[in-house]
Amino acid sequence: MPFGNTHNQMKMNYSAEQEYPDLSKHNNHMAKVLTPAIYDRLRSKQTPSGFTLDDVIQTGVDNPGHPFIMTVGCVAGDEETYEVFKELLDPVIEDRHGGYKPSDKHKTDLNPDNLKGGDDLDPNYVLSSRVRTGRSIRGFCLPPHCSRGERRMVEKLSNEALDSLTGDLKGKYYALKNMTDAEQQQLIDDHFLFDKPVSPLLLASGMARDWPDARGIWHNDNKTFLVWVNEEDHLRVISMQKGGNMKEVFNRFCTGLTKIESLFKEKGHEFMWNEHLGYVLTCPSNLGTGLRAGVHMKLPNMSKHAKFEEVLKRLRLQKRGTGGVDTAAVGGVFDISNADRLGFSEVELVQMVVDGVKLLTEMEKRLEKGQSIDDLIPAQK
Amino acid sequence: MVFALVLVLSCLHWLIFLFLCSAEYPDLRKHNNCMASHLTPAIYAKLCDKATPNGFTLDQAIQTGVDNPGHPFIKTVGMVAGDEESYEVFGDLLDPVITERHNGYDPRTMKHPTDLDASKIHSGQFDERYVLSSRVRTGRSIRGLSLPPACTRAERREVERVVIDALSGLKGDLTGRYYSLTQMTEKEQQQLIDDHFLFDKPVSPLLTCSGMARDWPDARGIWHNNEKTFLIWVNEEDHTRVISMEKGGNMKRVFERFCRGLKEVERLIQERGWEFMWNERLGYILTCPSNLGTGLRAGVHVKLPLLSKDPRFSKILDNLRLQKRGTGGVDTAAVGGTFDISNLDRLGHSEVQLVQTVIDGVNYLVECEKKLEKGQDIKVPPPIKQFK
């Protein structure tokens, strides 16, 4: 049952100028692209499920952004959003994903054999390795727009698929609304539990409605493969382990994802994917691979070096604190991951992380010994 | 035969509908709010595909109550109106919610009295050794424009335009000016904070989940008269919130200004072809069902250090149809024995009746405080008759 949509009917009684949002104090990708003319052309449209332009941009209107951090400022409510509102979303995607054009094709490669090396990241520096992505089930609206019935169906279908996993992927689902106190504590201790979002960026998009209905966490018995259900996307899939064996992490990631996809297909469902945008997710920033491969590594010296940011930029990597996005580094330990999502395959991105982490480790070792790293500074990838 | 077939088919249709809707029915098992108490699966099935002429749906109306299960002790309302028609289209749910929230007022059979004749008030001057300030507030909605949970940006801007245009026509002691939230200078902002006039983007999830904070701070603002005794909030939780206040205990004058100001604003918007949302069964229509009827909260800040420690305090307030809050307003604690005391009721009694109830009640409380000061005993008054 499509979710109700109020606003389009009333809006058309007013001119585009009267409805156009005040973006004069805004700094996000949506605000940069959305001219009054584009607003005028798109405002009468809606996707087949009723998602409108104002629904797309609400989070960007409500959250003007930050002078230094450029947020995306728009979300998709379903797969068709990216078609119906392409006039807005194509330039946003181009801006966010390093010049990715509407005519470009995205390559998907989930064959872990194509990754060179990655099983030998120095454990003296690399504390843990992790790869995450998201997947959306075709035919269902995305978290900003889905009805309770749709969200519950996503949960049900995901559970059926995950229940069928075997071997080292065999695991169990913990629904947020049914878990016991003991289960909850264990999930917190394992750093697996996700909570209702507090970020206004997420809340303003509508993805936290009806919390915690149909939300949950699945993980395998080994605690190395984890799936979040109905958080910011239909599914977030995470492979992780302590130490520096990124190859093993990526192997499990690809095997698990491929297996889950085939289980969905057996039941007549598939993931949202197309040749141009790759895997389709709620936030335009996660299109393509939706992949973030990263490590927690010790870089107490490198992080104080004047060229740290420049090196990361050239390696196409980004740093975060160990709490994840928007957190600070603690004790010189950083979360280092790929900056790109779209326009590179999964293998290519993980390769960049593996190669980049190796180089950073070399640099850290040199700096420890008081040696220069000038000859190691890489060219822009 | 045909009749039987039609009957079977419509039952089947209803059953299929019930089945489809049951997949959508919210999980309210851990909920304690008025909406959750009355939203049965059958009512949900009946209303789930309906929408007001503006397109506001049941799911939108109840979203705040689904997202905020409530508290075992405090029963919130758990739903909002998106427009005037919500109260009709979703009447099967809203009517019982209203009856529960408003102590037995039945909107299907009863009429709400409106009375803004301040001359009927008596004994409206409090002992200022006890009563520090007096205040009356209400809300008004502009007919024909959607309410804050549902309004578009253009509608909200239209509300702002209509209201400030009308307010610019106020004269005498009501002459004042408007401060738009998007345009105020830092100096103006600081002054409004110092005057305790400034309102900020709501943080309460009860409010934000209803959608009323969208596009903040677009088309929001504060108007007040030069004397700072008459204040209007534009596009916060309602189209307008109207406040009359002053230091000291002259509640009669506060209410007189309140009525005069409201009537003058109403006249000014009518001159321009607009009117307030009002009807005989629900009185003034506002976003939250708890504010229907008069939408009126008349209150004082009053020092009751001894009475507030007496175990009979709550019962006395109850019987007088009063409620206490801290001096920061709803959900705050009292400081130094000073309380915010106001009327409990909103619907089914007129403005004059409610303000008189507050006046009589506060006078009684002050008498109790004086008696306790002298070491005399106090009595719990008999309960004021309700219509239940």
Image: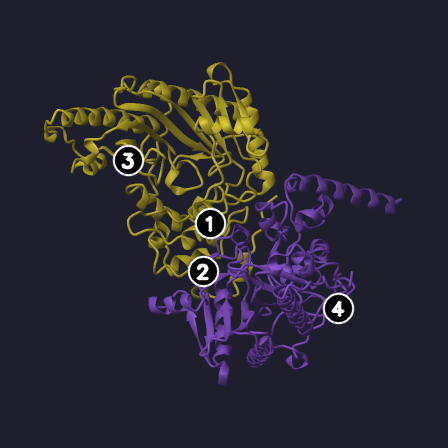
Image spot of residue B343 (x, y percent): 64, 65
Give B9 or B369, whichever is nearer the viewer: B369
Q: Pinpoint the chain carrying mark 2.
A: B
How far apart, in angstroms, are the residues tagged by discs 2 and 4?
36 Å
Q: Do marks 4 and 1 share a chain?
A: no
Q: Colour of chain B?
A: purple
Mark 3: secondary structure: strand
> Which residue matches tag 3?
A319
Q: Pinpoint the chain carrying mark 4.
A: B
Q: Do marks 1 and 3 share a chain?
A: yes
How far apart, in angstroms, are the residues tagged by discs 3 and 4?
65 Å
> Which residue matches tag 1?
A204
How far apart, in angstroms, are the residues tagged by discs 1 and 3?
26 Å
Image spot of residue B242 (x, y percent): 55, 71
Q: Nearer the viewer, mark 3 or mark 4?
A: 4
Would you call the spot at circle 4 few (<14 residues within 10 Å), some (14-19), or many (20 or more)? some
Image spot of residue A79 (x, y percent): 48, 41
Would you call the spot at circle 3 few (<14 residues within 10 Å), some (14-19), or many (20 or more)? many
Q: Which chain is yellow?
A: A
How far apart, in angstroms, are the residues tagged by discs 2 and 1?
17 Å
- Of the numbered discs 1 and 3, the one sitting upstream in the chain is 1
Q: Is residue A339 left or right of residue B342?
A: left
Q: Disc 1 vs disc 3: Cβ atoms closer than 8 Å? A: no
